[in-house]
Image (cartoon, rainbow, N blue to C red):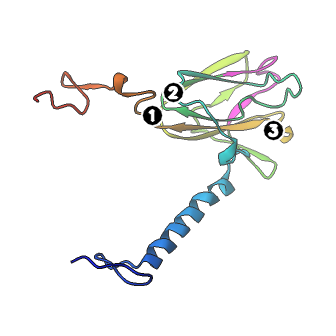
């Protein structure tokens, strides 16, 4: 049985328009509060989109500010290799996976970034979805920190790279 809805009446499933609208408003408010939990100062609007790239480089190579990573906040696809590059080296800018909050740096022992304390560059393969903050142990107070969001990426461009299942293109029945 289908009913015509007007403000405050109930439809087939017993939900009023007001209840649905209130739920949507609460959902939107909850999603917008996500930036309140920004890791290492990386709010939603600060992330640079680098999804679909096989490799992304993060370096402190800004000649006007050597205590800043570029890009500082970045979104990548699962399976992306992130190359960290330190100028002049990681001995001067030791990098750790972890968070900075209230002026305190906390190393995350489970971070795929780990610790990089020597050399000029190091690479990390990021395979699972999640957010991975990082910081320079010597200069985080000057803002030398950032975060990497890893998101699932089924098909970077189109369906041409879709996997095959049992010799057939993914999603195809093969018996038309």
Q: Which residue is mark 2?
A: 52
Rendering quarter of residue 115: top right
Q: Which residue is mark 3?
A: 140
Magenta run includes residue 87: yes
Say whether marks 1 and 3 touch (CB < 8 Å).
Answer: no
Q: Which residue occupies 44% across, 27% down?
A: 157
SS at mark 2 in the image: loop
Which secondary structure is most common in the magenta stretch? loop
Q: CA distance from mark 3 to mark 2?
A: 29 Å
| 123, 23: nearer the viewer | 23
Rendering quarter of residue 169: top left
Q: Position of residue 4 (x, y in %)?
A: 32, 78
Q: Which residue is mark 1?
A: 153
Say whether marks 2 and 1 touch (CB < 8 Å).
Answer: yes
Q: Which residue occupies 87% across, 28% down?
A: 65
Span colored in magenta: 84-97
Q: Residues within 10 Å of mark 1 (few under 14, many from 20)?
A: some
Relative vertical location of residue 112 with respect to residue 141 in this rendering, above or below: above
Quarter containing the N terminus: bottom left
Q: Which residue occupies 61% across, 31% down?
A: 113
SS at mark 1 in the image: loop
Work out whether mark 3 precedes mark 2 in sequence or the reverse, and give the earlier one: 2
The extreme bottom residue here reads: 8
Front label number (3 vs 2) = 2
Q: CA distance from mark 2 to mark 1?
A: 7 Å
Q: Which residue occupies 79% across, 35% down?
A: 144
| 160, 4: nearer the viewer | 4
Work out whether mark 1 precedes mark 3 in sequence or the reverse, and give the earlier one: 3
């Amino acid at each position: 049985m289908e009913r015509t809805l007007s403000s405050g009446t109930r439809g087939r499933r017993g939900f009023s328009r007001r209840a649905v609208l209130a739920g949507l408003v609460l959902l939107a408010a909850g999603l917008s509060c996500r930036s309140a939990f920004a890791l290492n100062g990386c709010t939603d609007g600060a992330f640079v989109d680098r999804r679909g790239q096989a490799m992304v480089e993060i370096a402190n190579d800004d000649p006007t500010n050597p205590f800043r990573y570029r890009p500082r906040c970045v979104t990548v696809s699962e399976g992306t290799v992130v190359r960290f590059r330190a100028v002049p080296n990681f001995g001067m800018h030791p990098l750790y996976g972890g968070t900075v909050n209230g002026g305190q740096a906390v190393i995350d022992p489970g971070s795929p970034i780990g610790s990089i304390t020597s050399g000029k560059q190091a690479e990390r393969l990021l395979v699972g979805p999640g957010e991975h903050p990082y910081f320079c142990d010597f200069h985080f107070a000057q803002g030398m920190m950032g975060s990497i969001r890893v998101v699932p990426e089924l098909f970077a461009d189109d369906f041409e790279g879709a996997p095959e299942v049992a010799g057939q293109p993914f999603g195809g029945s093969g018996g038309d």
